[in-house]
Image (spheres, helix red, strand yellow):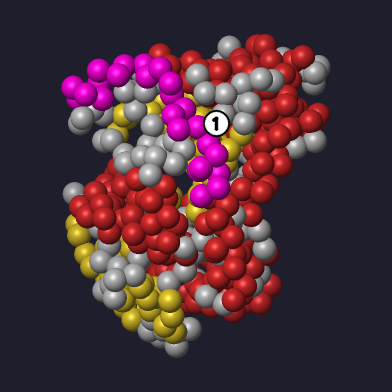
């Protein structure tokens, strides 16, 4: 039997203030508020087993210290006029805590249920903190900690920092000691920089770069849609989601990156661009690439949502794989420099380009979600098998289907798994059917693995 209880976390004497929202907050707030009841799909969700189990008082004390450390977890967002958004950082307040009490053997099932309950409803960003807490308690001890957060409070990179900081706090650190040794950029500080003359110049330069690339890019990437009748006859078609899990890719991408003197992220993006160009009929490829925007040390420690999209345009991407990878490094570097901007202002400029027929197809998305500090062989032994043998262990699955997404024809996420890399792909069946999705994913893998083998499998 599972019982339900509500408790409260109390915070006082923390940093407080009011100011304009950051570029990242404005971008995500604009998305989730338009989605309405569908907004929870952007919520971040965590169901964490606690080993060993701990008293609830200690767990809540640690979380209170986490709230004290990261302002974004207690920041509300209020619209101001037609084009303004204000962030309000509360220095004191109460956070509800949902508690489920059950036997220890039921905790692994109760945790995910509670997680979906917390993350499955939208946040009221004007009235509540963008952070929810749940505990699964068994015989007086917390066995699972359940957290849900709005995307306005953090992004995937920030989620990793939050978990690391919570672990450090649980081991005895305080918010003060951690911020002393690891200064983290807070949202009000970021907004102050973005609204300064330097920040405004960066914003203008980024939006100018975006518009120049969109004007130069291909008007259509998929010149020969896989199933054009679907677009006409099935406007509510579902988008399949494919997951390729590859131990061989995890090994091969490191080797190719080292031999070519580029990052493994550049190898993967270059391979994806080359494969997409070969398949689509367009030699030029344009991706919206999600960028963490954590290039400075203080930004790297931030939990607040900072990730935005860069416009990545690779010309003649179909000509040569090695050349595509080498050019990806320099093109991506310039694109990433222009990945911080006022998205609302950029959206207005892009709409004008689209209306005039002067905008490239920007419906292909690339998101390398990996934490550079946590590789696929951080917790498991690197395989000794040859790449040819490892390639036989690749797994392809079709976990779920999604409702159509605005301006999305193809979206690919790169993830780290124990002993493998994963490519997770969603595509509009009107431009790429399941066979095409598999061809793309396996093609990216084969390009990198074949290059590693040609250079001498180590």
Q: Nearer the viewer, residue 290 or 67?
A: 290
Q: Nearer the viewer, residue 279 or 132?
A: 279
Who's the residue at 45% across and 88% down the image?
13
Magenta segment includes 225: yes
Q: Position of residue 195 (x, y in %)?
A: 52, 75
Q: Which residue is mark 1?
A: 285
Q: Position of residue 112 (x, y in %)?
A: 32, 46
Q: Is residue 129 visible?
A: no
- Give the residue at the far bottom of this rendering: 13
Q: Quadrant of residue 300?
A: bottom right
Who's the residue at 31% across and 39% down the image?
405
Who's the residue at 20% across and 31% down the image?
236
Q: Position of residue 325 (x, y in %)?
A: 69, 30
Q: Nearer the viewer, residue 62 or 410?
A: 410
Tell me if 220 is positioned left or right of 369 in this view: left
Segment colored magenta:
211-234
Q: Secondary structure at mark 1?
A: strand
Tell me if 67 is positioned left or right of 251 in this view: left
Who's the residue at 64% across and 68% down the image?
298
Query: Please, is residue 338 above or below residue 26 in the view?
Result: above
Q: Nearer the viewer, residue 54 or 354?
A: 354
């Amino acid at each position: 039997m599972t019982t339900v209880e509500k408790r409260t976390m109390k915070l006082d004497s923390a940093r407080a203030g009011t100011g304009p929202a950051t570029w990242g907050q404005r971008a995500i707030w604009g998305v989730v508020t338009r989605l309405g009841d569908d907004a929870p799909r952007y919520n971040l969700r965590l169901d964490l087993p606690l080993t060993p189990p701990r008293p609830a008082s200690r767990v809540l004390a640690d979380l209170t210290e986490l709230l004290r450390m990261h302002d974004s977890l207690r920041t509300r967002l209020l619209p101001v006029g037609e084009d303004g958004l204000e962030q309000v950082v509360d220095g004191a307040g109460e956070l509800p805590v949902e508690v489920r009490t059950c036997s220890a053997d039921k905790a692994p099932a109760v945790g995910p249920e509670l997680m979906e309950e917390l993350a499955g409803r939208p946040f009221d960003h004007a009235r509540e903190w963008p952070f929810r807490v749940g505990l699964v308690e068994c015989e007086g001890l917390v066995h699972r900690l359940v957290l849900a957060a709005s995307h306005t409070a953090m992004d995937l990179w920030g989620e990793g920092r939050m978990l690391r900081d919570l672990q450090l706090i649980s081991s005895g650190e305080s918010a003060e000691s951690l911020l002393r040794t690891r200064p983290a950029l807070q949202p009000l500080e970021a907004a102050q920089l973005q609204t300064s003359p330097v920040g405004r110049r960066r914003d203008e330069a980024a939006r100018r770069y975006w518009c120049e690339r969109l004007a130069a890019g291909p008007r259509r990437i998929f010149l020969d849609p896989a199933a054009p009748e679907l677009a006409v006859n099935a406007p509510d078609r579902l988008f399949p989601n494919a997951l390729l899990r590859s131990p061989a890719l995890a090994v091969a991408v490191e080797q190719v990156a080292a031999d070519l003197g580029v990052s493994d992220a550049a190898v993967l993006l270059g391979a994806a661009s080359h494969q997409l160009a070969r398949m689509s009929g367009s030699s030029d490829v344009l991706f919206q690439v999600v960028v963490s925007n954590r290039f400075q040390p203080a930004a790297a420690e931030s939990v607040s949502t900072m990730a935005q999209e860069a416009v990545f345009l690779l010309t003649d991407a179909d000509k040569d794989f090695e050349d595509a990878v080498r050019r990806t490094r320099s093109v991506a570097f310039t694109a990433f420099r222009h990945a911080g901007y006022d998205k609302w202002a950029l959206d207005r400029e892009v709409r004008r380009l689209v209306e005039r027929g002067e905008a490239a197809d920007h419906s292909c998305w690339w998101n390398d979600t990996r934490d550079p500090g946590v590789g696929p062989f951080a917790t498991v032994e690197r395989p000794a098998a040859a790449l040819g043998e490892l390639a036989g262990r690749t797994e392809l699955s079709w976990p779920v289907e999604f409702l159509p997404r605005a301006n999305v024809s193809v979206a690919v996420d790169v993830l780290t798994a124990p002993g493998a890399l994963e490519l997770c792909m969603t595509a509009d069946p009107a431009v790429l059917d399941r066979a095409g999705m598999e061809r793309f994913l396996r093609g990216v893998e084969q390009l990198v693995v074949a290059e590693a083998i040609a250079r001498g499998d180590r």
